[in-house]
Image: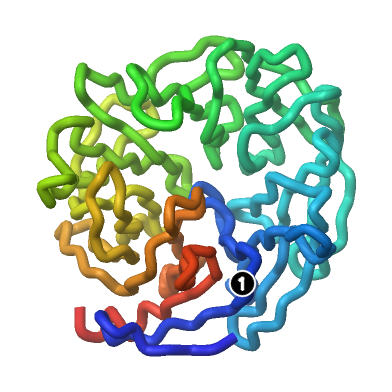
Amino acid sequence: MFEYQDKITGYTIRQYTEGPERNAKLYFTCENFSVDDRYFFFTKQELPGKTNGGCYRADVETGELTRIADSRFKGFATDREKNTGYVCKDGTEVYAVDLATGEMKKVGDLPKGCDITGHLTAADTGRIACGAHLANKLYALVILDPGKEAETVYLTDQHLGHVQICPTDEDLIFYIHETGGDAFQRTWMYDVKERYARPYYVEHPHEWITHEVWSSDGTEMAIMKLDPPGFVDGSKGEVHTGNIIIGDKDGRHFDVAASGVQCLHPAFSRDRKWLCADVISYLGTDIQEGVMLFERATGKGKMVATTNTNGGSPDHQHPSFNRRGDMILFSNPNANGIAQVSTIDLKQVLKDW
């Protein structure tokens, strides 16, 4: 662990990893910190000939790193309220992880031969949900209730991604049609009890919706709405606007909460008063990459950390808040574009906000 001063923003950044392997924070669509904010969690890539890959826990203050799951495990995510993580071993075995001790307990199995399409996700009742690519090559939404067998509740031939159960409503599962880019209708909600799917944000022609996340209380979702493809010409130096829109739980009302140049992945603070997003070079437009902080009440935004480009890697900065909302964790590409986990203490930002 070491600290340095951002050459553009002037703020102090604390970096926890360094090396040839990719060290990437958990995806922004789940909590990244333990309930007391003592630890955050990240994934280390396992390079050929090495055996040090897997999911790690970092002590925020000391920088001490502890591996809590090896590379056989994937889909790690932390619970919204409990000091528990969930992870999938060897494709189908689901374990609960005590975030304080690292102790693992098996809680069930997913359908045989499936492969999850993202991280695991849990509601406040303990119901776990995920997207899965089944052995028969269909895609599915799968739920696993405490003490019960896994149940496939929805089947489709569409690639399902970004599956997120509502943190406070176990019968509501958000998911997307994953195309790797734009989609005719990207965002969907599935009602487990009623067994039907409906569009969430209903898209009109030439809209581009992407990168969605629940608020921690399950009352809202943040979504990035981009300029549509072809709307601006990156080869001429034009930039894309990323509008962070906030929708209610039912998808009936949406407001633009903040806007930023080349923004892509949004996240809420737990009190929903603040938003953050990464600023990324994409669609032919190169720009100074980094992390933005937005005040929701005013829409005011400020670049708080700058980074190198990820060089086309899938590891974007994916910023998200700790549980207190006074720190942002992000993947910080090194000079070679390889992610390294870093934090910025927002107290130094808010004193002159």
Residue at 26 percent across and 81 percent down: it is: 9
Look at mark 1 in the image and give the residue it sits on: 36
Image location of residue 304, percent across then percent down: 30, 73
User: Which quadrant of the figure has residue 227?
Assistant: top left
Instruction: Say whether residue 35 is visible.
Output: no
Q: Secondary structure at mark 1?
A: loop
Image location (x, y in percent) of residue 281: 30, 53
Whether residue 310 sits left or right of residue 279 in the image: it is right
Quadrant into which the C terminus falls: bottom left
Callout 1, which amino acid? Asp
For residue 210, above or below residue 268: above
Residue under the point 59% across and 11% down: 156
Quadrant of the image occupied by residue 223: top left
152 or 286: nearer the viewer: 286
Where is residue 283 shown, x and y percent of the image? 27, 42
> In this rendering, would 338 be left or right of 236?
right
